């Protein structure tokens, strides 16, 4: 039979894992993606996932993907300036 744990102990144990707040800060960038990149790019891209500080972005076409590769430094700069606690420090275009 397993032992019951105190709520405080469970919270401490949970907080040692990758925190929920870290993930929420990263997903703030997802919610603001169109504001970050602008409406035309926002319409032609889709955020696939955020994992280990990498934002995976699917482009509608290879032409859009190439455009994003050229814009990557500017996009990362905006993310770092406007969402410094997001933990997003890399973009990967699909």
Image (spheres, grey):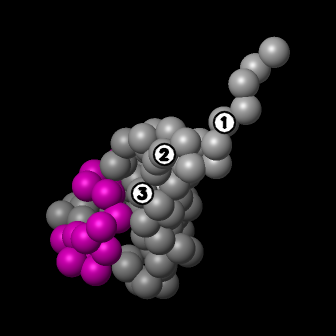
Sequence-first disc among 3 and 1 = 1
- In the picture of the structure, the residue carrying the numbered disc 3 is 22
Q: Is residue 91 magenta-colored?
A: yes
Q: In this view, does 54 lie to the left or right of 81?
A: right
Place of residue 29 in the rendered image (x, y in percent of width and height, measured from the top left): 43, 69
Which residues fall within the magenta stretch?
A: 77-94
Place of residue 20 in the rendered image (x, y in percent of width and height, measured from the top left): 51, 54
Q: Is residue 13 magenta-colored?
A: no
Q: In this view, does 10 lie to the left or right of 51?
A: right
- Between residue 57 and residue 7, name the one nearer to us: 7
Q: Quadrant of residue 46?
A: bottom right
- In the picture of the structure, the residue carrying the numbered disc 2 is 12
Place of residue 41 in the rendered image (x, y in percent of width and height, measured from the top left): 45, 74
Dot 2: element: helix
State if disc 1 and disc 3 touch (CB < 8 Å): no
- In the picture of the structure, the residue carrying the numbered disc 1 is 5
Alpha carbons under labels 3 and 2: distance apart: 16 Å
């Amino acid at each position: 039979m397993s032992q019951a744990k105190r709520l405080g102990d469970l919270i401490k144990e949970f907080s040692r894992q990758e925190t929920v707040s870290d993930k929420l800060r990263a997903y703030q960038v997802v919610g603001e993606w169109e504001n970050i990149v602008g409406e035309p790019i926002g319409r032609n891209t889709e955020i696939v996932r955020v994992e280990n500080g990498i934002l995976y972005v699917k482009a509608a076409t290879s032409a859009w993907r190439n455009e994003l590769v050229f814009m990557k430094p500017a996009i990362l700069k905006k993310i770092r300036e406007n969402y410094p606690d997001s933990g997003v420090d890399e973009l990967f275009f699909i």
